[in-house]
């Protein structure tokens, strides 16, 4: 196979040019539509300059483009794009494992009391540091992060992510009812604080802002109007919230908004749909909502570990695909089982295997859901999500410990697609050897810190 593409910039020797040689896999196209979407090179190469990908493809072809580049030989492992998590709650890091509860009970008894602790700026800052380290330790280079209800906590998150080198999209969580009183803010304060955070962090470095109503049940019509105003005034900001996660939640939302025919109608009334909007979960969705989500170009963050852990249900993947609704993966964190996008991909596969009308997720589709699908959902498909030229050099080098079961399996595989399947089945943070964001190493196995919650 030849070179997958070439950046139009002139090839000249550069001291920060690097040529990485390794087996390479990515999905520049959507495998749900294109059976040839998986691009894989047994002897592959990635040429990087100034933190961006210049070329990728077969070693012999890419090597010929710049014979002066420093070579990094990573044969023995596998090069994948950096993972993109499209739904993860930063304040919930310390409450992972609250099993045996349904959504509303879990929120009241486990998640919300912990989120109230984010009012302590020191506690929030420590959580933010641990949170971003755990993301990078698991190979996540871009994340849509559900934020906190407090401005200092959000400042800590944005600053910690910038220091770590991660690309995050996040925002102040807006709620004024149905939660703990300490998590409520007035619509006026919500607007004022959101504008200040947008001015400070949106499009600054690798940070982007998202307007984040907690969910319809915790937002009055006045607060939803604030969200609408923010989106109108800052149209390039993203929108992120929850929808159709649990039958009890849906019933409560429709009761709170009796004029709404369904959950989505609440957000539609306030112009909170569209191609910039990502909705988490959508397990119990109507056909009408699917049709309208597709027409609006909105995306769904599918969180299979959380859906199973909270007993929310099995995601109707086939119905979303048939309707043309874009889907990616999210770990959720507190309601889920950890930070690993590879584990989330495996759980998506397992849940679909037992679903009444499940989709058989191939290794290619799992890789796509963990990478390019998330980038597309966030409007970052031109910046990250695969290893094509011109994009940021965001990637993960997977190389399991030599005495691990995964290493034994990889020693017997017959194809790169089999290797990818084994990585999804067995790899955890111990197999993430190095993580790069914008070409810079943000995590190396030998440099991992013991306080990074890497095994979460």
Image (cartoon, rainbow, N blue to C red):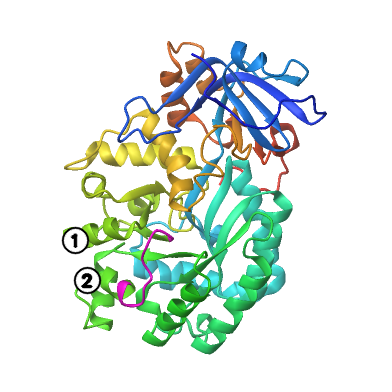
Percent position of residue 62, x then y:
62, 18
Please say if the residues under marks 1 and 2 sit with CB atoms less than 8 Å apart.
yes
Residue at x 52% of width, y 35% of height: 386
- Of helix, strand and loop, which mostly describes the magenta segment? loop
Verify whether residue 270 appears in magenta: yes
Verify whether residue 221 appears in magenta: no
**Mark 2 secondary-structure assignment:** loop
Q: Which residue is mark 2?
A: 262
Percent position of residue 32, x then y:
31, 35
N-term-proximal mark, 1 vs 2: 2
The answer to whether 390 appears left or right of 292 in the picture is right
**Mark 1 secondary-structure assignment:** loop
Q: Residues within 10 Å of mark 1 (few under 14, many from 20)?
A: some
Task: Let me know if residue 453 appears in the view.
Answer: no
The answer to whether 336 appears left or right of 171 in the picture is left
Residue at x 61% of width, y 10% of height: 60
Residue at x 62% of width, y 65% of height: 202
Above or below: residue 61 compared with residue 329: above
Tell me the magenta residue range: 268-276
The answer to whether 241 appears left or right of 183 in the picture is left
For the residues marked 1 and 2, what is the alpha-carbon distance in whole angstroms?
A: 8 Å
Mark number displayed over residue 286: 1
Above or below: residue 315 compared with residue 198: above
Above or below: residue 176 compared with residue 115: below
Percent position of residue 9, x then y:
67, 32
- The image quadrant of residue 192 is bottom right
Which of 140 and 297 lies nearest the eye of the viewer? 297
Task: Let me know if residue 81 appears in the view.
Answer: yes
């Amino acid at each position: 196979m030849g070179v997958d593409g070439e950046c139009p910039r002139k090839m000249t020797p550069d001291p920060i040019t690097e040529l990485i040689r390794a087996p390479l896999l990515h999905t520049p196209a959507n495998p749900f539509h294109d059976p040839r979407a998986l691009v894989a090179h047994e002897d592959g190469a990635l040429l990087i300059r100034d933190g961006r990908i210049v070329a990728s493809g077969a070693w012999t072809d890419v090597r010929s483009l710049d014979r002066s580049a420093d070579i990094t030989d990573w044969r023995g492992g596998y090069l994948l794009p950096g993972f993109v998590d499209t739904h993860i709650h930063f304040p919930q890091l310390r409450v992972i494992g609250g099993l045996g509860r349904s959504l509303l009970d879990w929120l009241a008894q486990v998640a919300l009391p912990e989120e109230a602790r984010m009012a302590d700026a020191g506690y929030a800052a420590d959580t933010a540091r641990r949170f971003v380290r755990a993301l990078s330790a698991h190979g996540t280079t871009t994340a849509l992060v559900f934020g906190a209800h407090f401005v200092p906590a959000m400042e800590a998150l944005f600053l910690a992510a910038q220091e770590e080198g991660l690309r995050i999209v996040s925002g102040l969580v807006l709620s004024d009812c149905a939660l703990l009183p300490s998590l409520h803010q007035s619509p006026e304060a919500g607007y004022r604080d959101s504008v200040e955070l947008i001015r400070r962090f949106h499009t600054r470095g690798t940070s982007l802002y998202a307007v984040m109503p907690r969910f319809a049940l915790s937002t009055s019509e006045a607060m939803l109007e604030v969200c609408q105003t923010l989106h109108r005034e800052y149209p390039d900001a993203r929108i992120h919230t929850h929808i159709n996660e649990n039958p009890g939640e849906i019933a409560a939302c429709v009761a709170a908004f009796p004029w709404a025919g369904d959950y989505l109608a609440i957000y539609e009334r306030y112009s909170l749909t569209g191609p910039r909007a990502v909705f988490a979960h959508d397990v119990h969705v109507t056909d009408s909502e699917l049709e309208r989500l597709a027409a609006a170009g909105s995306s769904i963050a599918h969180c299979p570990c959380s859906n199973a852990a909270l007993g929310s249900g099995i995601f109707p993947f086939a119905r979303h695909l048939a309707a043309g609704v874009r889907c990616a993966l999210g770990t959720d964190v507190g309601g889920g089982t950890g930070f690993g996008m590879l584990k989330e991909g495996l759980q998506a596969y397992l849940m679909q295997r037992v679903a009444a009308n499940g989709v058989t997720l191939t290794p290619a589709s799992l890789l796509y859901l963990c990478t390019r699908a998330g980038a597309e959902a966030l409007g970052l498909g031109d910046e990250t999500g695969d290893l094509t030229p011109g994009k940021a050099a965001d990637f993960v080098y997977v190389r399991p410990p030599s005495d691990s079961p995964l290493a034994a399996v990889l020693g017997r595989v017959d194809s790169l697609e089999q290797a990818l399947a084994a990585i999804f089945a067995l790899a955890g943070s111990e197999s993430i050897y190095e993580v790069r964001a914008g070409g810079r190493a943000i995590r190396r196995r030998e440099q991992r810190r013991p306080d990074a919650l890497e095994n979460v």
